[in-house]
Every structure is written in C-alpha cells, then in structure tokens.
Amino acid sequence: MRLLFFTPHAALWSHTVPEMYLARCLRELGHDVSLLGCAKVQTYCAAMSAWGLAPAGEEARQRADICQECRAAAASIGDTLGLPSAMLDRWVTADDQRAADAAAAAAVAEGSLDTVHLGVPVGRIALYELTLARKKMSTDYSPEEWNEYRVYLRNAIVTLTGFARAFDERVPDVVIAFSPQYSNINAPAQYAIARGARVLFMESGTNISHRLGTMRVWDWARHRLVNPALTYWQGSSRHPATARAAQAVAGHFRQLLSGQHFAVFSSPYVKPQGDLRERWQISPGQRVVLMTLSSYDEAYAAYLIDAFPERKVFSDVFRTQAEWIAATVEWARSRPEIALVVRVHPRDFPNKREAVRSEQSYRLEAILTDLPPNVRVNWPHEDVSLYELLEEVDVIVTGWSVTAMEGLVLGIPVVTYDARLPSYPPDVMRTGRDEATYFSNIDQALAAGWSFDNVLNGFRWLAYNFVGCTVEVSARLSRAERADRSLGDRVIGRFKRRFPAVGRRLDLAHWRDAMAGAQQISKLIEQGADALPALAGVTLGEHPCADDEVVAQQLQVLYGLLYGGSRLSVEKPGLARSIRRFLASRGMHVQ
C-alpha cells in the first residue's frame, strides 16, 4: 500500500527516530513509503515550542536555526534510510502564505473560531495548542491569547493548503502521523480522511521506562484521543499479566519514583519517616480519603477539537470538578472520622516544565477556602510526593486522574464518581453513574480496605496498555530518558549532542530493531484493523498465565523501591504494613 508519513517536526529527533525506524521497516515489508516534511512554511511549530519560543515572539534567528535543524534531520533520514521525501514548500506559494495570514487576521478581528478551509474546520482545530499552552478551560481570550490563536490558525491553514496539493498528487492509501491532534497535522489529517484515506495516530508508549522504545498506533478517525484499549478490554480476568508485562509495570514505577522524567509532575519520592499525619494534624483514628484532582485543559482541548466526546469532559453526575469538590467536602463535613486530603494537580501551577498557571487554579483557590477541620488541601508548592502521601491513604477518590492507577497497583481501593470519565475501565475500581452511588462506593471502599485484588487489577490494566497495546520499536531508544541510564549511555548521548550529524546517522543505523513492531503495523493496515488489540492472529507478549505469583513478585520489587531502608516502624498502620503482611502471607521476604 501507499503510505505517507507526514513529519513536519523532524527536529523533534527523539520522536522522529522511532517513527522513521517503522517507516523504513514498512518499506522493507513491501509498502510504498514516502515522507512529507515542512521546509519553513510554518512560522511556528511544536519544535519551536519545545525550544521555548512563544507563538507570537520575535526570535527570528532562533526560528531559522530550528528550521535548519529540521531540514538537516530530514536530510539525514533521506541519506541514511533512502526513503523518498518531499517538503511542503513545493506546494505552498507566497500568495498562499499571504492568504493564510489574511484569513487568520480576519478571524481574530471578528472574534471567530469557525474558519473553514478546504472543507476542514481549521478554526476549531487550531484551538488545541492554545488551550494547552495557556491551560484554558474556556474560550474567553485576552488580546494576547487571540494573537497567539492567529498564529496557530495561520499555520494550520498553510500546512493544510500544501498537504492537500501533495495528497491529491500522490493519493496515498494511508497517512501516518505522530501526534495528529496538533493543529498543523490534524487539519491535513481531516482532509485525508474526507478523501477516503486512512489516518493512523502514532505516539510513544505510556510506560515511561520504555517510552521511546514503544509506539501506540490506532485509527485516528475511529478513536481520536480515546484510548482504544477501553474498547477491547473485556474485564480484568481476561488479561492476566505476563512476567514481562509485570516487570514493565514495575519499571514504569521505578521512573515515576525518581521524579526526574519530564512527564512526571510530582516531586521526587523521599522514603516516608512516618510524620505526615502529625504535620497535617490527622488523628490516629481518622481514615484518610485522598481526593486527586486533574488538570482540566488537556481534556478540554481534546473536546474542543472533537477528539474527546462531551461525556469524557462534562459529567452528568457532577458537571465540573468544582461541583465534585464542593459535594465531597460537604460529605466530609458530616464525617469527622474521615480526613479528606484534596491534592491539587501540580500542572495547574507553574512547574518544572511550564511557567503558566491554569485558569482552573484560580477557581480552586476560590472554592478551597473555609473548609471544615477534617479537610486539608495539598498544594503543589508543598512538594509532597504522591507516594509519601499514599503511605497514609485508605481510599483514593478521583474524576479521571492517572494517580488512581498508581494507588491501585499498590493495593489501595479507588473510587471514581462517573464511570465514563476515566481512561481506565470501570471493572478495576468502584464507580457508578450517580451521586448516591459515588458516596456509597467510598464507604464500601473504606470497609474493604487494602486488597491484592486491587494490585492485580492495576497491574493487569497497565500491563495490557504497556505491552498488549503497543508495538516494540527499539529497547536502545528507551534508555535515553531513564534517570538510571548508565555512564556509557550518558557519554554516548553527550557525543551525539556535540556532533549531531554523526549522532543522527548512528541513531538511524539501528532501524531494523523495529521490524517486529512494523510487522504488526503492516497487519493492522492490511487487515483494516482500527487498533493493535483488534489484530487477528497476533500474539502480543508471551502466552498469559495465572498471574498471582508474577504480580506478587513485582509488588515485592515495588515495596523495596518504596520502603527499603525506611525508618518506619514495622507496626505503624499504613500502606507499608499492608503490603508487608500480604507478602509475608505468601512466604516472601522483605527488608
């Protein structure tokens, strides 16, 4: 089949390399593969954002340097892998650029978000990056934000114009793009879909110990940003974790605990010494319910571009997080035996990745006041690691935060207030579809307490995602992001940064690592499957077996990571004691 890899961000090399491994392998498997890049038709892009430039900034020299880096990366791919490529500037004229400038300026002048170009709703599509960058939860924009929107809209129009002409000339069967939710890719993707081509979403895996070495792939028109694993999951008991998959889950947690990966917002983990209750004035008899909030703009951005359905953003149990917080605080007010800890997501405030404060943060400050004495707010500036907090937690309640899975893997019961919100399945936790069920589930979870069944459910869901719903690209690529990478890997990394042209050739030389993963993608294309779990006759990982033992072994590993060398008393009630007693019941030694 004719496959077109649309790669307008080649300078984002760590993401480009695994994509190109797969492209080269797919060519080896008999597909007609070609590449389409940018070549300076955009005035702003994800690569410029990654280098810290602002959409409407004046850094002409830096932008030119990044464009040159993109060209150099594309040239290295062509020279090393021999993949035919073209650039959008072949199909974009100066008149096209001026027309895009004028259309974007007119939309801003009119306050319009509904620009349509070549039948594609680029006005709405261009909202994605602005919503994320400004951490918005509304479309009420300041003059500065409107100016930034103009930039995103202008570039979406330009890339769509060039892509449409290239597409009509080449007529590919399948378009493959990394992160097609971004406006300069999504607009072309919608054009391709409207003309009968398939568009495949491609993005690195979610296991941060092996992120760059794996790839998620699915049909963009069918699933958008909703994880198709939810569609194909048929219950926890149907997906016992293999030894390899359980080890992958433990590896993911090892990196989470380091707090050093760019995707981790929480503070680095410090082994608990047992004084958190005293510091927060939580009495020994109180049960601790941890309320983990989510940053809102990511879900809202997906909703604005029609990549999330409304039900995954606006619940009919509690319409907003604010309503959920208010109702849960009132519930706690009448329950003095409960200590409710409200943990605000670190991303809502300036953090190690972003200097912007979210719209939601101001609302949270307004509503999290005049609280009852048994309700305590954990603000990001307090630098309390989630795992220090989990030592004291009896139940986690959340809307859709992934911290629920982090607690579940350690055996802590999880309650969500609306089964349709999270990106994890309802059978691994307690959930429902109304307010009464939500509060009843909290009481049931408190009564049930710590359970190895929770551990199994957490491991199985994460294992299914990490192994069953990704393709392997290259183990060597994953090491670059790990906090525990070897001295040799660090030296090689510095050499590649010092001599980028040589580094790119060295990276691309290992493209054959991705052959097994490319074979799965090839079957996905040929069978017309919409996601990796849907493939017929494909085994993802070794044959599943009864997983109690392999999961217990990895729980033992996690216990060592969390509590090895800790000064906690062995008799102190809490997570450590619950895990230790369970492991002891199975004859497993812990220090």
Image: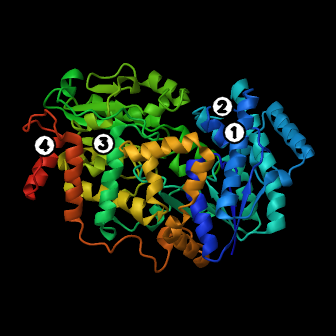
Q: Which residue is mark 1?
A: 66
Q: Which residue is mark 4?
A: 577
Q: Looking at the image, which is closer to me, 317 or 202?
A: 202
Nearer mark to the viewer, of 3 and 4: 4
Task: Give the CA distance from mark 1 to mark 3.
Answer: 44 Å
Q: Earlier in the sequence, mark 1 or mark 2?
A: 2
For the C terminus, the image quarter is top left
Which three-letter amino acid code belongs to the residue tagged 3?
Ile
Whole-percent x, y for residue 135 in the image: 57, 33
Q: Earlier in the sequence, mark 2 or mark 3?
A: 2
Which three-letter amino acid code belongs to the residue tagged 1?
Ile
Q: Earlier in the sequence, mark 1 or mark 3?
A: 1
Which three-letter amino acid code belongs to the residue tagged 2?
Leu
* Residue at 47% across, 29% down: 351
Q: Which residue is mark 2?
A: 53
Q: Is residue 309 visible?
A: no
Q: Secondary structure at mark 2?
A: loop
